[in-house]
Amino acid sequence: MSKANKERIYNRYLTVCQGDVLLINFGKGSNGCRTKGTRPCVVISNDSSIKAEGRFFVVPLYRNPSKSVNVEDILIRPVDCRGLRYEEYANPMNTVLAVKCRVIKKIGHIKNDSIVKELTVALWDQVGENAG
C-alpha cells in the first residue's frame, strides 16, 4: 500500500476535536503568510462546527514568540500537551482554516482547558476589534 493511500485511510478515521494538537502540512506557502511547511497546530473550532463543515480553524504553534508589540502570544508547555517536545507559542492572529486531508497526524490534546479558552477569547477579541 502506498504512503498516500495510508494517509487517506488515516484521515478518514481521524476524529478532530477542539483542543487537539495536530501536525499539519501547509505546503510551500507562497500566499504571503508566515505559516508554511509542516508544523503543530491547536484546533480552536468547536466540535459541532467541525462535524457539520468538515473544516476547522487552527492556530499554528511556533517555538519563538512573535516580535509584534501589539500581540500577546499564549505559551503552551509540554506539560499541557503530552505530544509536544518543546515550549510552543500560539498567536491567535495567525488563525488558519484547515481540512482533514492536510493533517499528518494527531500529536495530542491540550489537557488544560484554560489554554483553549484563552485562545478562543483572544480570537474573539481580535474579531471584535476588526469589526468595530
Image (cartoon, rainbow, N blue to C red):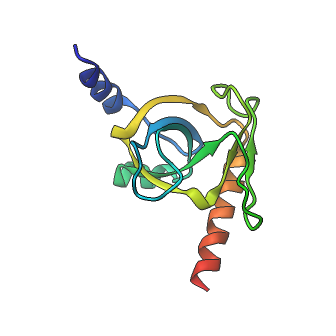
Name the residue: 41% across, 36% down: 103
Q: Is residue 51 left or right of residue 121?
A: left
In the picture shown, does residue 8 fall above or below 46? above
In the picture shown, does residue 21 fall above or below 122? above
* Closer to the camera in the image, 96 or 117: 96
Q: Residue furthest top?
A: 1
Mark count:
0
**Residue 37 picture location, percent across and down:** 46, 39
Name the residue: 68% across, 63% down: 122
Name the residue: 75% across, 35% down: 77
Report the quarter where the N terminus lies.
top left
* Closer to the camera in the image, 55 or 62: 62
In the picture shown, does residue 125 fall above or below 106? below
Q: Is residue 80 left or right of residue 107?
A: right
Report the quarter where the C terminus lies.
bottom right
* Closer to the camera in the image, 72 or 64: 64
Name the residue: 66% across, 28% down: 84
**Residue 67 picture location, percent across and down:** 73, 57
